[in-house]
Image: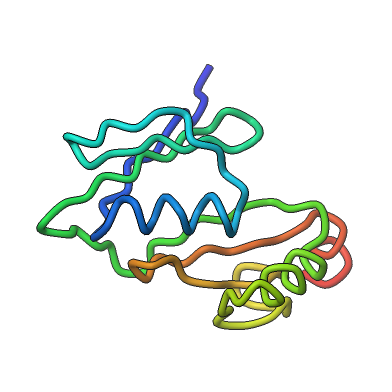
Amino acid sequence: MLKFDHLTLPVSNWTASRDWYVKSLGLKIEFEVPERRTVALQDHFDFTIFLVQDSVLFHTAGLSMTFQVDDVQKSFEDLSGKGFQFTHPPEKRFWGYGAELRDPDGYFVRLWDQKSMKARG
């Protein structure tokens, strides 16, 4: 059995990134290690993203994280209403149908839902 368990993401400011992921995507804080400038965030299915502040960021060109939501249009409207800026609204793209925004370090964050993907992807 193979199960993707966690991802470590280098960030420029661990607290700003933590706040962004909690406020935008509703991830919960699993634990923090302030002296290591690290926070572990979990989704509702216990997948963990470690945000680690690093003075030298190792950005991978085109790195994206895709999150499934209940309703991509509603998520887009809710987050837009809270001031989050999207690179594009829900629409057909090369990766399917969904919306895309960027986190504080410029990583792509994509949102999709199963119903819209089947109908429009």
The image quadrant of residue 84 is bottom right
Which part of the image, by quadrant, shows the C terminus?
bottom right
Residue lying farthest left?
55
The image quadrant of residue 7 is top left
Question: Residue 20 at x, y = what percent?
Answer: 48, 59
In this rendering, the answer to whether 108 lies above or below 88 is above
The image quadrant of residue 105 is bottom left
Q: Foreground residue, 103 or 1?
A: 103
Question: Residue 28 at x, y = what percent?
Answer: 55, 38
Q: Foreground residue, 99 or 31?
A: 31
In this rendering, the answer to whether 59 lies above or below 18 is below
Relative side of 104 to 74, left or right: left
Report the residue at 53% width, 33% height from top. Answer: 47
Question: Residue 49 at x, y = what percent?
Answer: 43, 40
Report the residue at 42% width, 50% height from top. Answer: 18
Relative side of 54 to 106, left or right: left
Residue lying farthest bottom?
88
Q: In this figure, what is the number of numbered marks?
A: 0
Report the residue at 84% width, 61% height from top. Answer: 118
Q: What coloring was used for the rendering?
A: rainbow
Report the residue at 77% width, 74% height from top. Answer: 77
Question: Residue 15 at x, y = what percent?
Answer: 34, 51
Relative side of 53 to 118, left or right: left
Residue lying farthest top?
1
In this rendering, the answer to whether 25 lies above or below 74 is above
